[in-house]
Amino acid sequence: MLTYNLSLAGLSLAGLILRSIFPRTLGLAWATPDFPLLLVVFNAMFRGPLPGAAGGFCIGLAEDLFFGRFIGLNALAKGAVGLLTGFLAKSIYKENMWVPVINVFVGSAFSLGVVFAIGHLAGYRWHFTVVFYQGVFELLFNVCLVPFVYGPFFHFADRRLHLREDNG
C-alpha cells in the first residue's frame, strides 16, 4: 500500500507539472486537460469512497499549493469528486472502458460545478457562460484522454493493490 501511495503522489506531481507546461494556446477556450482529476477518479474507482475522497483532497490541495490561487478550492472539489466516484464505481466492472469514461465525465462536470459554486460563495464573480464554455472543453479533453491513460493506470493499480492483498 505504501508503494501505491508513493507512486500516486509521484504521478500527481507529474500531472501537476504536465498541466502547468501544457500550452494553453493548444487548448480550446483556454482549457487544458485536468490530469490530477483523472488520477482522483481512477484512484477512487479502485479504492472506494473514503480513500478516494482523502486522495482527492490531498491531490487537490497539492494543486492549490502548486498553482498558488484559491487555496482549498480544488481540495474541496477533488475530495468531493473522489467521494462521488468511489460511490459510483463501488461494484462496477472496472475492466470495461466505458466505466472510466463515464466516471471522468461525471467527475469533471461535478468538479466544475463545485468550483463554480464555492467560488461564487467566496465572492468571485465568474461569468457562467465563460466557465461553462471553458469547462465543456476541459471535460472533453479529460474524456478523450481516458483511453490513453486508463489502461496503464489499471495495470499499475491492479498490480500494486493485489500485492497488498496477497501479502496479507
Image: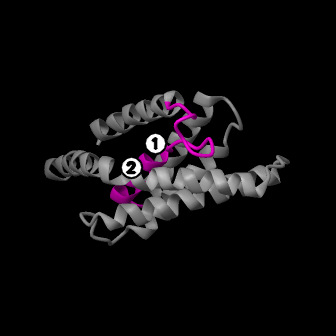
Residue where numbered disc 1 is placed: 35
Residue 67 among magenta residues? no
Residue at the extreme left of the image, as rendered: 166
Q: Residue at x 67, y 57 (%)?
A: 132
Q: Which residues are magenta?
A: 22-48
Q: What is the three-letter code of the residue carrying label 1?
A: Phe
Residue farthest toward the bottom in the current orientation of the protein: 91
- Residue 118's disc number: none
Q: Give the label, 2 or 1, closer to the camera.
A: 2
Residue 32 image offset from top left, x and y in percent: 54, 41
Label 2, label 1: how many angstroms apart (C-alpha)? 9 Å
Q: Residue drawn 31% across and 54% down?
A: 147
Give the mark nearer the N terminus: 2 vs 1: 1
Q: Please, what secondary structure does the residue beneath circle 1 have? A: helix
Q: Which residue occupies the foreground of this view, 133 or 95?
A: 133
Q: Hey, what amino acid is under mark 2?
A: Leu
Decide which of 113, 44 is in the foreground and name it: 113
**For the residue labelled by badge 2, is the local secondary structure a helix, a strand or a loop?**
helix
> Which is nearer the eye, 75 or 131?
131
Residue 148 left/right relative to 27 = left
Whole-percent x, y for residue 149 in the image: 32, 47
Q: Are marks 2 and 1 in contact (CB under 8 Å)?
A: yes
Relative to 84, say whether 153 is above or below: above
Which numbered circle lies on residue 145?
2
Picture coordinates of residue 45, whole percent (x, y): 37, 59
